[in-house]
Image (cartoon, rainbow, N blue to C red):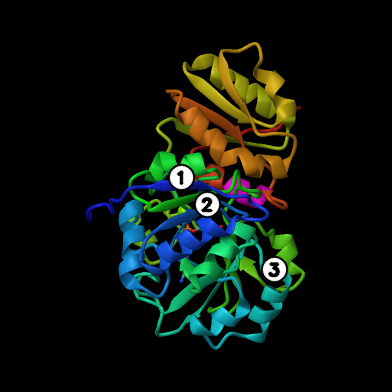
Amino acid sequence: MREPYRTSTITFRVDPQVPEPRPIALAGEAIRAGGLVAFPTETVYGLGANALDSAAVEKIFRAKSRPANDPLIVHIADLSQLPGLAVSVSELAYRLLERFAPGALTLVLNKREAVPANLTAGMDTVAVRMPDHPVALALINAAGLPIAAPSANRFSRPSPTTAQHVADDLKGRVDIILDGGPTGIGLESTILSLVGEAPQVLRPGGVSLEELRAIVPDLTYQPQYLADEAAAASSPGSMLKHYSPRATVVLFRGDDDLAVWAAMRAFADEHDHVGAMTLEREASRFADLDVTVESLGADLDAAAARLFSALRSLDSRGLKWILARAPDSSGLGLAIGDRLLRAAEGDVIDVKPRR
Ligand code: TXA
Ligand code: MG
């Protein structure tokens, strides 16, 4: 593993709606100079560098301790930046961008030569998105460059949804952190590949499959969870073990509420140092047990926004077990379930309905 990138970190608070020009100008300058800037997007915080500078891109991998076979997403602020990154962009791609840019949709396209090979992990495709966040857009505009940015977490930690999460993972490894408060969606973008035979979702995320299907009726999604690192290398993002908390995450799945709660309660009863992530209305189910409960809020939107923060919080409390329930897979539930399954490394308990 290469040496981590080391630097001193400055954090600037910025107004998430109307970012102050001075910190944005300084951050844009840092990007132009080949440095690293962490910034909020509507999904999660990103760790940014000049996408067209392979030395700057290399710093991202070193700061995150990210394996070189995991390609980065390039962020743009204007569609005029797209032709500098991708070639043979289809009419479908433009229709999708018209509907979802700016927004939580990343498109995988054929890359232009100018995009450095380390950014795309040697592949001839490039992932591009336009974030829907005033701070991200202002930063890209100030830099005057497309910005490469993975999520701003240490490799195999949950994605950061606050500037504090970024600092916890990357203090001393990023030049500037722009603190624009908590991110809105809380889960990463949906990745849609347009380079294969049919449009294919590679990662469910902030834009639901239902929304995408309105424009791409023939899109496919085949969840891939590869436990084997060698096999996963040729298929970026498919590694099963993605977030690996110190605690063991156990995922409960089933349609019968009472049966699922009973199974979770039984597990909690039989084990020590148990935490649970639940919707607000389910939290009371554990009130009489010795379980540390982290509420995910009232509904799926709230759960998405709080999921990573809840994982980090529970994992910092020295628990042995974190119990969670898989949501049904409509809307944001698909992406939440995907992240939970990875956090659980596939450790799922299927609960049969009671009669
Ligand atoms: O919401 C998001 O997408 C956030 C914010 C910061 O924009 N970014 C993010 O990046 O989640 P990251 O690095 O954590 O995830 C990037 C993933 C890679 O792991 C890989 O799965 C996929 O994007 N990817 C990037 N380039 C690709 C390519 N050329 N082909 C296929 N997948 C690609
Ligand atoms: Mg990530």
Check contact, mark 2 vs mark 3: CB within 8 A: no
* Front label number (2 vs 3): 2
Q: Which residue is mark 2?
A: 45
Q: Which residue is mark 1?
A: 166
Left or right of residue 308: residue 295? right
Question: Vertically, is 340 above or below 74?
Answer: above
Instruction: Please tell me which residue lies in front, 30 or 226.
Output: 30
Disc number at residue 330? none
Q: Main secondary structure of the magenta part?
A: helix
Q: Is mark 2 within 8 Å of ligand 1?
A: yes
Q: Give how far across and how far down residue 54 sits, in percent.
A: 33, 72
In reply to whether residue 337 is colored magenta, the answer given is yes
- Label 1 element class: helix
Question: Vertically, is 242 above or below 36?
Answer: above
What's the magenta region?
A: 333-338
Mark 3: amino acid: Phe
